[in-house]
Image (cartoon, rainbow, N blue to C red):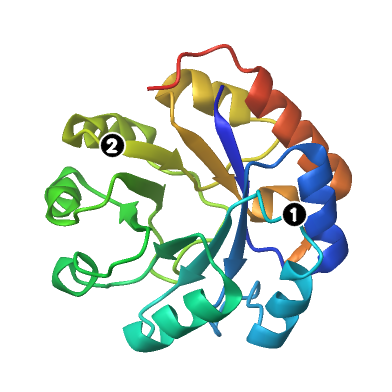
Amino acid sequence: MTLVKICGLTDLNDTLDAVELGADYLGFNFYPDSPRFVDYEVAERIFEEIPTNIPKVGVFVNEDLPKVLDLAIELGLDMLQFHGDESPESLNGLGRPWYKAFRLKAPEDLAEIPKYHCDWILVDAYSEKAYGGTGLTAHWDLVHEAEKFGKKIILAGGLNPDNVAVAIATVKPFMVDVASGVEASPGRKDRHRMEVFISKAKSALVRVK
């Protein structure tokens, strides 16, 4: 069964809804320029109210790594997602669970993937205007090419309740990641859209690699 990450959570009620509806991972964006940015104090309050057995992912974009590590320890983040232009040299010796996001635009972009020594990668849509959360659909053909590096694939980019089943059948990812596709407005989730998305993702009959 494909796992589901609800990302860009900024509100306790939305987070509790995601937990109740069956999300496997919860994503919190600590990039200040994102419309889904959540600051430390808000995240801390949310984390106090949610089950500790559901992994919390911190999303960072070109952030100072000592600051990232301090925040990860203070908040108890289970996984770090790097969605910017972080170099493999800066991440490979990090010492905490992490993965890299790739905004694939062309086949030559694939050459960067094996340089990062993480077990998972997130594949998102390319945009010149933003580091993810654009609602643009990822290049699924390139996702297939990315599989050859032996990493577990998290599929993001333009997923919503209407296309997630097709996306899973086509790409066969380890996990799907959704933010804007289940929102009422940037940073605020729509419970019904989350419910339908999670239900369709988990009922898609494909073999997870």
Nearer to me, 22 or 156: 22
136 is higher (above) or lower (below) than 89? above
Residues packed near mark 1 inside 10 Å, few (<14), some (14 to 19) or many (20 plus): few
In this rendered view, identify the residue nearer to me: 181 or 119: 119
Residue sitting at x 71%, y 86%: 41
Horizontal and vertical percent for residue 18? 77, 48
- Which quarter shows the N terminus? top right
Q: For the residue carrying disc 2, how many other residues have a C-alpha within 10 Å: few (<14), some (14-19), or many (20+)?
A: some
Amino acid carrying label 1: it is Pro
Instruction: Relative to 66, say whether 142 is above or below.
Output: above
Q: Which residue is mark 2?
A: 142
Front-lying residue, 73 or 67: 73
Q: Residue at x 66, y 55 (%)?
A: 180
Residue type, mark 2 in image: Leu
Q: Residue 146's x, y, as percent?
A: 24, 37
Residue 135, percent from left and from top: 58, 53
Q: Is residue 125 left or right of residue 20?
A: left
Label 1 element class: loop
Tag 2 secondary structure: helix
Of callouts 1 and 2, the N-terminal one: 1
Instruction: Give how far apart the Cα atoms at labels 1 and 2 are.
Output: 36 Å
Choose top left, top right, bottom left or bottom right for residue 101.
bottom left
From the viewer's perspective, is 102 left or right of 29? Answer: left
Marker disc for residue 51 = 1
